[in-house]
């Protein structure tokens, strides 16, 4: 069984570890042993726990899960040279990673929080010699897509990385709308979850426009509601969300 060494123990690290825990040995490196103990207890499996300062990374496979602003500080605390570092840091370029983390190879990855249920849509780019290994590793937590440039992964960060928050907003808003019209909260939540579950299957094989056309009959309920969404500039707002998130990723 291969070992993955997590540098960082935040929410994303936990989500990925949750997806990998049955297939990989997991080491976690952090600043606070008590927080590492909490990580282990929550994960429900035995992990090896290490403090960050002076940690020896020689020939290890690293999964870098710290905040982008901390990459320089963290790099100074690590010793040795890693085999490869897989980074989940939004907007942090391969060049910046190479200059701060001593490793033979660097791959940028952008998973999302669905990693914890092995449904992440993870995008990848970087050292192409590790493409196959990267797809195998991150494939353990969902789907992967190798991209040809760092610009593309920054755009993908705005779409797949940030996307769960956008969909959560839509899910909450639709549920609130049903409650406003008289549906009980528990019923509205159950129906919304069923909606998203079924839609997730349908969208795999059907173009969004065709799905919409298949539901929208002339003068019907869907057409009335869809018109309200267009009046509210929902389409434009979604496109602007991707634009602003992409620009933010390039600034980090």
Image: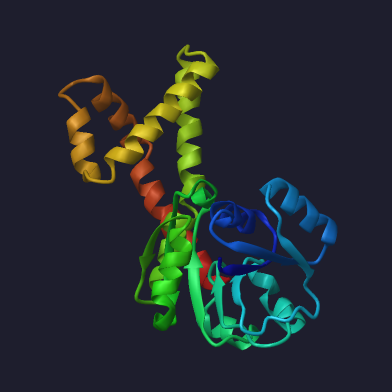
Left or right of residue 13, residue 239 in this image: left
Residue 102 x %, y %: 63, 87
Can you give x and y, in whole percent of width and height, for residue 196 in the image? Answer: 40, 34
Q: Between residues 6 and 177, which one lies in front from this camera angle?
A: 6
Return the residue nearer the eye: 176 or 187: 187
Count every numbered label the image shows and give the total.
0
Of residues 13 and 162, the one nearer the viewer is 13
Residue extending furthest toward the front? 1
Q: Position of residue 164 (x, y in %)?
A: 49, 47
Percent x, y for residue 1? 56, 65
Query: In the figure, 226 relative to 156: above or below?
Result: above
Quarter residue 59 falls in:
bottom right
Identify the residue at horizontal 23%, vertical 36% (top origin): 212
Left or right of 187 in this view: 232: left
Farthest left residue in view: 218
Which residue shows up at 56% across the image and 53% down it? 22
Q: Residue at x 18, y 34 (%)?
A: 213
Q: Is residue 233 above or below residue 16?
A: above
With respect to residue 241, does 153 lie above or below? below
Q: Is residue 246 visible?
A: no
Q: Quadrant of the C terminus?
A: bottom right
> In which image quadrant can residue 74 be found?
bottom right
Q: Residue at x 23, y 45 (%)?
A: 205
């Amino acid at each position: 069984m291969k070992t993955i060494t997590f540098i960082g123990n935040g929410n994303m690290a936990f989500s990925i570890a949750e997806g990998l825990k049955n297939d990989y040995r997991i080491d976690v490196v952090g600043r606070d042993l008590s927080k590492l103990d909490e990580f282990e207890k929550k994960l429900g499996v035995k992990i090896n726990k290490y403090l960050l300062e002076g940690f020896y990374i020689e020939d290890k496979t690293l999964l870098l899960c710290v905040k982008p602003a901390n990459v320089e500080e963290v790099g100074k605390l690590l010793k040795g040279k890693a085999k490869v570092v897989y980074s989940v840091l939004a907007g942090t370029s391969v060049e910046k990673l190479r200059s701060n983390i001593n490793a033979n190879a660097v791959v940028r990855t952008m998973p999302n929080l669905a990693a914890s249920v092995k449904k992440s849509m993870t995008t990848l780019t970087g050292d192409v010699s590790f493409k196959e290994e990267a797809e195998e590793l991150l494939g353990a937590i969902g789907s992967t897509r190798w991209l040809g440039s760092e610009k593309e992964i920054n755009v993908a960060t705005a779409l797949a990385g940030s996307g769960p928050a956008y969909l959560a907003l839509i899910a909450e808003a639709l549920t609130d709308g049903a409650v406003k019209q008289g549906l009980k909260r528990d019923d509205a939540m159950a129906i919304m979850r069923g909606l998203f579950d079924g839609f997730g299957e349908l969208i795999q094989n059907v173009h969004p426009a065709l799905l919409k056309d298949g539901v929208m009959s002339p003068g019907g309920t869907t057409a009335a509601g869809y018109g309200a969404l267009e009046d509210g500039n929902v389409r434009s707002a979604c496109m602007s969300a991707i634009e602003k998130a992409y620009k933010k990723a390039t600034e980090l």
